[in-house]
Image: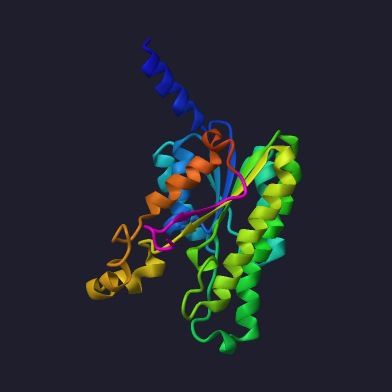
Amino acid sequence: MSTQTTSSNAALQLFDLTGKVAIVTGASKGIGEQIARYLAQFGAKVVISSRRQADLDELAADMRTEGGEVTAIEARMGDEAQTKQLFDKTVELYGGVDILVNNAAANPYYGPTADCPDDAFDKIMDINVKSPFQLCKMVYPVMKQRGGGSIINISSIAGDTPDPGLGIYSVSKTALNMLTKVFAKEWGADNIRVNAVAPGLIKTKFSKALWQDEKTLQHFTKRLPIARMGTVEEVASLVLYLASDAAGYCTGSIYTVDGGTTI
């Protein structure tokens, strides 16, 4: 076997997730769905979660046709009891958790921040910050017992620069970024890595209003160094890297996938 072939095999082994157990929240569509697919394709046993069991069941069935081992568990982020049930069922089924992807997020209000209703503020913070905080606390002792793990929080470039009309959403993502760094600093000695991925404009159903009209799309992309929208695959591939041993020396960082928007 050539040195080049040996090196290639070693590189591929770094991305091998065989035997690993992963939880992905907000996994029924978009970025979360693609993350779940990639983790399963590289060997992880993946627990997918979102608000609707029917959507999850459909995705799980499709992923199984690709050879993935996947379990669908309905859980509404922002509800601590359902979050705990998601964790408990995963541990009961697979014995632990090695990878946690906090992808679920919400933004029920668009407009001036001063007009944001208190109930909308609470929902944004509960789902975007408190639920990831709770899930991280739940998986910590299990990951520590298993010798380590990887937590990836899906943030947003809005956590660095406020998005117009999305003030409290931006605040929540800034908080999630700091939570990422705090846990990374506190849990590094336990071989638990914690990172965040901050997408920019990504082509999903959520962003359809921005890309279904070509003029609107060009308005948002023409000044970017990479003058187009990103894809869910480009976000998911970075999450795959961070979940794997290939990113063994990476923790506490916020990785942008934004075509250079934040330069």
Q: Position of residue 84 (x, y in %)?
A: 71, 56
Q: Residue at x 30, y 69 (%)?
A: 211
Q: Is residue 260 magenta?
A: yes
Check the image and name the residue furthest to the bottom. Answer: 115
Q: Position of residue 81 (x, y in %)?
A: 72, 62
- In the image, is 18 to the left or to the right of 203? right
Q: Position of residue 193 (x, y in %)?
A: 64, 43
Check the image and name the residue furthest to the left. Answer: 214
Q: Residue at x 36, y 12 (%)?
A: 2
Magenta residues: mostly which secondary structure? Answer: loop
Of 104 and 213, the residue lying toward us: 213
Q: Residue at x 43, y 36 (%)?
A: 67
Check the image and name the residue furthest to the front. Answer: 263
> From this viewpoint, is residue 212 visible?
no
> From this viewpoint, is residue 157 visible?
yes
Q: Quadrant of residue 115?
A: bottom right
Question: In the picture shown, does residue 154 fall above or below 165?
Answer: above
Q: Quadrant of residue 227?
A: bottom left
Colour pattern: rainbow
Q: Is residue 161 magenta?
A: no
Q: Quadrant of residue 232?
A: bottom left
Q: Quadrant of the N terminus?
A: top left
The residue range painted magenta reads 251-263
Q: Residue at x 67, y 66 (%)?
A: 79
Q: Position of residue 184 (x, y in %)?
A: 67, 48
Q: Quadrant of the C terminus?
A: bottom left
- In the image, is 101 to the left or to the right of 191? left
- In the image, is 90 to the left or to the right of 200? right
